Image: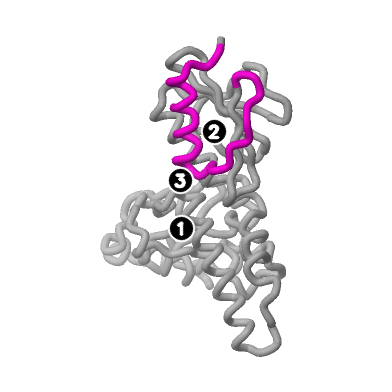
């Protein structure tokens, strides 16, 4: 079935409005798009008027979209690795937007962005090294906003100026820039949770459950909103490479 003019417009709008600003032609009934901000190519098509398909050039992005769309068994165009479906134009926009966010955050895109911005900068003096570090922290925060969709990973707070980019394994303890800038080495947190996590009053289990140190008494837990069980949402497999470090080195155990 050939794409209708209405569906072509819908597909183009979904791509351009959500970060895929590079039109790369067509492959049959698939429209092809890239992004000037992420190393990912997508293919978009429609099956009738109420079902849309998005195909991806990267499996890591496809795999991270487990809660969006349905994996499609339809044939994908040459160069694409897998596809997901969206049931209506609104769902299509959400799927493409999330695709763009993940493409900027995974797996080593933050490191690439950091190297692009700092590759020519000197690192001789302490002041120069601090400038490079500040850029790295800006890139890290920006990509955490992409990964967590601008919301606290625990509470869902969506006020950008109040959110903090919290490292699981602190910047100074990381052995490489790849570790420092890995989005899986971070959580986007509300200020009180960021402070508690940074100082070891809370940590996170591999299943996402928030563990509160026994040093926080009932009154403190109530004031901090920790009297009920808390959980990190959208925890990825990559986070489990870093969380044990935090539990062992930062978390305040009863005898610590």
Q: Residues within 10 Å of mark 2 (few under 14, many from 20)?
A: few
23 inside magenta stretch: yes
Numbered marks: total: 3
Q: What residue would you read off at disc 1?
A: 188
Q: Is residue 194 left or right of residue 85?
A: left
Relative side of 37 to 203, left or right: right
Q: Are marks 3 and 1 in contact (CB under 8 Å)?
A: no
52 versus 37 height, above or below: above
Q: Is residue 63 visible?
A: no
**Disc 1 on helix, strand or loop?**
strand
Q: Is residue 92 above or below residue 169?
A: above
Q: Please name the residue shown 55% across and 13% down the image.
A: 2
Q: Tell me the mark number nearer the camera, choosing from 3 and 2.
A: 2
Task: Report the residue at 37% width, 66% height from top.
Answer: 191
Looking at the image, which is closer to me, 68 or 211? Answer: 68
Residue drawn at x 59%, y 54% as measured from the top left? 184
Residue at the location (69% across, 30% down)? 81
- Please state the horizontal and vertical placement of residue 25, each as a whole percent of the image: 62, 31
Give the Cα separation between the discs numbered 2 and 1.
Answer: 20 Å
SS assignment at label 3: loop
Is 41 placed above or below 200 here? above
Where is the N terminus found, in terms of image quarters? top right
Earlier-in-chain disc, 3 versus 2: 2
Q: Which residues are magenta?
A: 2-29
Residue 112, visible in the rendered structure = yes
Considering depth in this image, is 138 or 225 the residue closer to the camera? 138
List the residue tagged with mark 3.
233
The span from disc 3 to disc 1 (Cα, nearest Å) is 11 Å
Which residue is the site of mark 2? 66
Q: Position of residue 229 (x, y in %)?
A: 37, 49
Q: Which of the two marks, 3 or 1, is nearer to us in this view? A: 1
First in sequence: mark 2 vs mark 1: 2
């Amino acid at each position: 079935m050939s794409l209708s003019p209405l569906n072509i417009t819908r597909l183009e709008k979904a791509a351009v409005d959500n970060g895929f600003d590079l039109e790369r032609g067509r492959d049959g009934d698939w429209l092809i798009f890239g992004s000037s901000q992420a190393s990912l190519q997508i293919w978009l098509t429609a099956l009738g008027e109420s079902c849309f398909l998005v195909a991806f050039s990267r499996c890591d992005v496809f795999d991270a979209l487990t809660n969006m769309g349905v994996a499609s068994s339809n044939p994908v165009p040459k160069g694409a690795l897998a596809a997901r479906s969206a049931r209506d134009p609104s769902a299509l926009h959400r799927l493409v937007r999330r695709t763009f966010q993940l493409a900027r955050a995974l797996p080593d895109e933050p490191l690439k962005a950091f190297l692009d911005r700092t590759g020519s900068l000197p690192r001789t003096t302490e002041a120069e090294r601090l400038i490079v570090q500040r850029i790295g922290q800006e890139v890290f925060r920006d990509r955490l906003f992409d990964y967590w969709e601008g919301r606290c990973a625990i509470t869902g707070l969506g006020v950008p100026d109040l959110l903090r980019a919290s490292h699981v394994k602190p910047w100074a303890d990381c052995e490489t820039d790849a570790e420092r800038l890995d989005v899986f080495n971070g959580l986007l947190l509300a200020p009180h949770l960021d402070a508690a996590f940074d100082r070891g009053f809370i940590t996170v289990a591999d299943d996402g459950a928030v563990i509160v140190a026994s040093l926080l008494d009932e009154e403190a837990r109530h004031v901090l909103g920790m009297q009920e069980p808390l959980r990190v949402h959208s925890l990825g497999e990559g986070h489990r490479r870093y969380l044990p470090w935090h539990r062992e080195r930062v978390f305040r155990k009863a005898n610590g």
